[in-house]
Image (cartoon, helix red, strand yellow):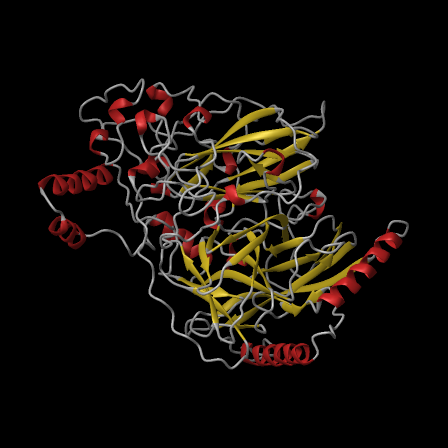
Amino acid sequence: MQRARPFRIRHGRADQLRALRASSAQTEADDAQAPDRRADRRSAVWPRSCNVGTEENMRLVAGIALALAATLSVAPALAQRVDLTLEERTVNMNGTDRPAVTVNGQFPGPLIRLREGEEAVIRVTNRLDRSSSIHWHGLILPAAMDGAPGFSPGFMHGIGPGETFEYRFPVVQSGTYWYHAHNLDHEQRGLYAPIVIDKREAEPFRYDREHVVQLSEWTDERPLRVLQNLKRDPGYYNWNRRTLVDLIRDLNRAPDGEARRAIIRDRVDWGNMRMDPTDIADVTGATFRYLVNGFRPEAPGTLLFRPGERVRLRLINSGAMTYFDVRIPGLKMTVVQADGNNIQPVVVDELRVAVAETYDVIVEPREDRQYQILAEPMDRTGWARTRLATRMDAPVEPLPPHRPRPVLTMADMMMNPGPTGLDRGTPLPERDQPGHVAPMGGMDHGSMAGMDHGQMQGQAAAPAGQAMDHAAMGHGSMNHAAMGHGSMDHAAMGHGAPAQAGAHGPGTPATTTAGGMQAHAGHGGMAMSDPVVHDTGAPPGARVLSYRDLRQLRPDPESRPYDRIIEVRLTGNMERYIWSMNGNEFWRAQPIVARLGERLRIRFINETMMNHPMHLHGMWMVPDLGNGAFNPRKHVVNIKPATTLDVDVIVDAEGDWAFHCHLLYHMESGMMRIFRVARDGAPVASAQQPRQAVMPAGHNH
C-alpha cells in the first residue's frame, strides 16, 4: 500500500484505493442490478473494467455504430482529448517508502480508451525533475508521435521538466495495447498503463464484461543500481544456482555408475563454459515484487463477474524483465486477440506472455466462486495474481506451490552459427566487435546428453587444451562459421517447419526432450529447440499456447513474398553484461536501412541462452509460421534461446524507428538499433563509420 508523503502529495495510496474500490464496487453493483443499462462512459480515461451489456444492447450499439460510420465517412474524425500529468509520489510495496513515477496520481497509470477512426490528442505535462517520455506501444502512428527520445523527429530530448508535449495522431487500429516511458528509470518505477481501442464495427466475438489484467514488477532498488549490480555480476539476482549440495544429492539419486559419470561430465561442461543452467532470468524475485494492476499477490485485486457471463480479459505484460506463465485453475481460456489483432479463436489451458506482449482471452466462469488468475514468472521466484469473484469481500485464497524451476540443457546452447554471410541491412559493411562472438573451443561435445556432435558435418577437432569461453559470447555464442557452417540452411534443418500435432493439441510438439524441445533434423540428429513452443511445466494433456496457434481471423491483404532478407543475430557478452545485435552495441552500430514499400524478411538468430522479445516501433512484424496469409501480425516477437526465426516486416512508415529487445536492461545495455525507412534514392546514412556515442537522449540513466 502507498502512504502519503507529507506536504508533497494530496492523497495517499490508501485513500486512492478506497475511492477506486468504492467507485468500482458501486459501478459493478449498478450493472449487476440493471445489466441492460450500460452507462455511456465515453471519457477518454476510463476505469480499468466495465460491463458490455446484454446482447440486445450490443445489437443496438452495433446499429448505432453503423450509422456513425456512415456519418464519419463524410465528416472529419472526432478528436479524443486526454490530459496526463507525470509526477513523483511515494509507494510502499515492501515496508519502505520508495519514489514512484505516477500518471495523474495513479500507479500504474490510468487506462486510456480510444476509438478506431478518430483522432487522439494527448497532452502530457512533465512535473518530474528530469526529462521523460511516453511511447504508445504497438500503435501505428507518425514517427514524430512515437514518443521515443532520440528517434522521433522533434522529440530528441523527450519532454523536459515543466514542459507539456501534445501527441496528436489518427487512431487506425483497435485492440489492447499499452503506453510506457522509454527510459530505464521511469518505466521501471511505474510509468506504464493500458490502452484499449474500441473497434469501429462490432467485434467478431461476444462477451458480457471485460477487465484489464496488467502484469508488472516493482523493485525498491533504483533501476540504475540494478543495472550496476548486473554489470558487476550477471548472476547477482540468481539465487537458484546449483551448489555442491545439489551435486551430492544428484549423485546419490543416480541409478548406476554411468549416470553418475554423466552428471559429472555435465557439471564439467557447464563449468568450462562458465555458465549456469539455472540462469533463466537476469532479474528475479530476489529484488522484484510481482504485481497485477498494481496489487501485490498477498492482497490481490478483485475482478467481478456473474456466473454464466462471458468475461474478456485483456492481458498485458508491462514487466521490465519478466516472462509470465498465466493460467486460471478451473477455467479454459479462449484466445481471441494477440497484440491487438483478431485471431481465429483457440482454446488453451495456459499461455506464456513475453515481455510487452498482449493477449485477449475470453473465459466463462459458471460457478458462484472465486477463480484465481495466476501468473508465475518463468524462473519460479514469485507470483503475480488477481482473482475473478462474485463479490469484492471474498476471502483471499492461498497461493499454490511453485512448479519445479526450469533448468537449461545443452540444446539451449547449440544453435549458434555466428555470421552466416547474409546481408545485415547496414549502409556499410559491418563486423562484430571483439568478445561478442568467440570461436569454437575444446568442450567435450561427446559428453552432451542427447546430442551427437560427433556426427556434425564439417566439424574439425578442437586443439587440445583450448577452452571454450561461452561467457564472453553472451550466454554461449559459438562461431559455427568457423566449423564449416557459414552457409547453413536453417530452413532445411526444420527450424521454419510447423511442429507436429501431439498430445497437447496443435502447436505443441509430439515428442519433447526435458527442455520441451522437439527433435529436429540437422546437426546429426541433435535435439534443436522449436522456435515457438513453450515448456511451462504444464501437466500432461494441458494445452499451452504456441505462436503456431496464432492464425489471423482473415487473410492478410498485404501478404506476399518477401523482397529481400537480412540477418539479425542476437549477441552479447554476459560477463560484462553487454547486449548487442550482430555483434555491435547500439552506440557502435549503424542503422538498419529498409526501403519504403518493401516486404523485408529478418532472419533472427539467437546466439544467446536468453529469450529476447524483439520490438519494432511503428510497423507490424509477421513471423513466418507456415500459415501463409494467415500468419499473425505482432508488435513483439519472442526469439527463444538458440533458435532461428524468420519474421517479415511490412515497411510502410517512413522515418527513424527504434528496434530493440524489450527486456529493459538488455535495451539499456546495447541491444537496440535505428531502423531507418527511406524512399528510393533518399540518403540513408552518413558515409562515416558510426562513432562512439551514448544512448539516445531519454535513455541515459
Can I make out residue 656 in this image? yes
Where residue 561 appears, as percent x and y from the top left, is 62, 26
The residue furthest right is 74
Name the side, left or right, on which 304 lies relative to 529. right
> Up-down: is 247 above or below 624?
below
From the top left corner, tell me how far across and down residue 524 is, in percent: 31, 25
Query: Between 158 and 541, which is closer to the camera in this rendering?
Result: 541
Residue 578, picture quadrant: top left
Name of the residue lying farthest toward the left: 257
Q: Residue at x 51, y 47 (%)?
A: 662
Residue at 42 percent of width and 22 percent of height: 488
Name which residue lies at 21% across and 21% down.
463
> Residue at the spot x=63%, y=24% of the render?
563
Measured from the top left, where is residue 478 in percent x and y?
34, 30
592 left or right, relative to 520: right
For this view, does 125 lie left or right of residue 289?
Answer: right
Q: Is residue 4 above or below residue 76?
A: below
Q: How many marks?
A: 0
Note whether residue 10 is visible: no
Observer-nearest residue: 4 or 54?
A: 54
**269 vs 69, nearest the viewer:** 69
Q: Which residue occupies the foreground of this view, 590 or 643? A: 643
Location of residue 24 in the rendering, given as x and y in whole percent from the top left corner: 62, 76
